[in-house]
């Protein structure tokens, strides 16, 4: 994103712009710089360090699976002890 500098000679237009920026979720600092608030991302847990019960709790909450970095590896690990039909 390119930075832009606006020169607004009319104070009433500046006040309208400030209100518009606030409505858009932007912050105007004392020095006149406009910034967007930082949104901190939630870091998903390392699924390999969770217990079986904790993994089931994630699934019961209706998670979308983003907390599982490698879903196929997780699935193989969970099914490792399960006897497969027609498997010798």
Image (cartoon, grey):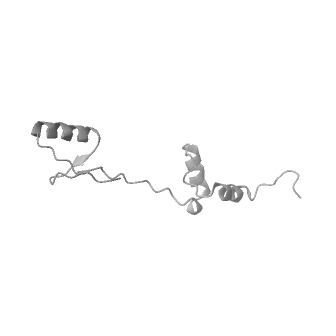
- Picture residue at 55% right of the left edge, 49% below the top: 58
Is 77 drawn above or below residue 28 in the view shown? below
Q: Viewed as shown, does residue 62 lie left or right of 37?
A: right
**Quarter of the image holding residue 88?**
bottom right
Q: Viewed as shown, does residue 66 lie left or right of 29?
A: right
Point out the residue furthest to the bottom here.
49
**What count of labels does the image hold?**
0
Q: Nearer the viewer, residue 12 or 44?
A: 12
Q: Position of residue 16 (x, y in %)?
A: 18, 36
Q: Position of residue 15 (x, y in %)?
A: 15, 39
Q: Position of residue 35 (x, y in %)?
A: 26, 51
- Picture residue at 15% right of the left edge, 52% below the top: 30
Is 2 drawn above or below residue 24 in the view shown? below
Q: Nearer the viewer, residue 26 or 64?
A: 26
């Amino acid at each position: 994103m390119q930075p832009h500098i606006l020169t607004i000679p009319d104070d009433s237009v500046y006040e309208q712009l400030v209100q518009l920026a606030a409505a858009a979720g932007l912050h105007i600092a004392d020095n006149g710089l406009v910034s967007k608030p930082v949104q901190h991302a939630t870091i998903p847990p390392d699924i390999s360090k969770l217990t079986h019960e904790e993994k089931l709790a994630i699934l019961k909450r209706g998670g979308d699976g983003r907390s599982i970095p490698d879903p196929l590896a997780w699935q193989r690990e969970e099914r490792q002890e399960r006897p497969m039909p027609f498997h010798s």
